[in-house]
Amino acid sequence: MRRIVSVVIVIILGIASYLFYEHTTLKQQEAQRQMFDIVMSEKMRHLYENAQDWSKPVSLDVHDERLKGDYKILSEFVLNYWLKNIETRNTYLRDLAAAKWNYFLDINRLDADRKKNFVETEQMLQAVRRITTQYQKQNLVDKQEALAKVKELKIEQNLKQSMQEKLEKNLKLDQESALILLELKILDKAEQMFVLLKENDWHKENGQIMFQKDTQVKQFNALYQDVLNLNKEIEQKKKQNAEEIEEEL
C-alpha cells in the first residue's frame, strides 16, 4: 500500500513539475514576445529616422541584451533586413546626386552644355540609366537573399513560417519596385526631353527654354508636366510606405 502511495506521489509530483515547467516556459515566451515588440519598435523608429538623411551610410546596433533565444535571432534578422534595404536605397540616391541628376533641367547648365555638343548631358543620362538599373537588380537580390536566409534560421517553426510569409508577400508586392518603376518613367521622359533639346533650335530667355516652334513648346511642356505628375506620385508612394512602416511599429 505504501508503495502504491509512493508511486502515486511520484506521478503527481512529476505532473506538477511538468505543469510548472510549461507554465514558466509560456510566461517566459510571452515576456520575450512583448519585449521583442518593444525592442523592434525602438530600433525601427531609430532606423527610419536616421534613414531620412540619405547623404551618409545608415548605422544601427542590431543587438539588444533584453532579448534572448529565438526572439533575439529573429530581431537581429529583421533589423539587418531593413538596414540592408534602406542602405541599398540610400546608396542609389547618393549615386544619383553624384551624377548631378537634380541639375538635368538646369537652364544654365543646359545652355553651357549645348556649346559642348551636350557631352555632359549624354553622360548624365547614361549614368542615371546604369545607376537605376543596378538599383533595380540589387533591390531584388536583397529580398531574394533575405528569403533564402530566413529558411535557415534556427528558431521555432511558427516564427520562421510567419517571417517567411511576410518576406514572400514583400517580394510580390514590393513597394520599392513600385518607386523604381516611377523613377524609370521619369528617366524615359527626360530622355525624350533631351531629344527635343538636341534636335531643335532654342534659346534661354528669362530663365526659360524657348523653342522656335509652338509644336516643340507643346511637346516639351507636356513631357515636363508628366515629370511633375510622376514626382507627385513618387511623393505619395513614399508617404504611403512611411505610413505602412508606422502601422507595423
Image: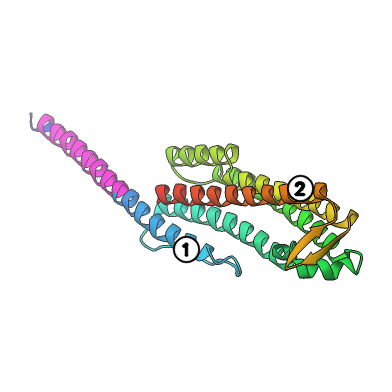
Could you say which is closer to the camera, residue 212 or residue 22? 212
Which residue is found at the position 83% from the left and 64% from the top?
Answer: 203
User: In which quarter of the view is residue 128 placed?
Assistant: bottom right
- Residue 141 appears in the rendering: no
The answer to whether 75 appears left or right of 118 in the picture is: left
Which residue is found at the position 60% from the left and 68% from the top?
Answer: 57
Which residue is found at the position 70% from the left and 50% from the top?
Answer: 186
> In this figure, which residue is indicated by the disc labeled 1?
49
Q: What scheme was used to colour the molecule?
A: rainbow
The amino acid beneath tag 2 is Lys
Circle 2 SS class? helix
The answer to whether 187 appears left or right of 29 in the picture is: right
The answer to whether 175 appears left or right of 207 in the picture is: left
Q: Position of residue 183 (x, y in %)?
A: 68, 50
The circle on residue 159 is none
Quadrant showing the N terminus: top left
Give yes or no for contact between labels 2 and 1 (Cβ–Cβ under 8 Å).
no
Could you say which is closer to the camera, residue 181 or residue 146? 181
- Residue 165 in the image: above or below residue 52: above
> In this figure, which residue is indicated by the disc labeled 2?
218
Q: What range is drawn magenta here?
A: 4-30
Within-10-Å neighbours for mark 2: few <14, some 14–19, many 20+? few
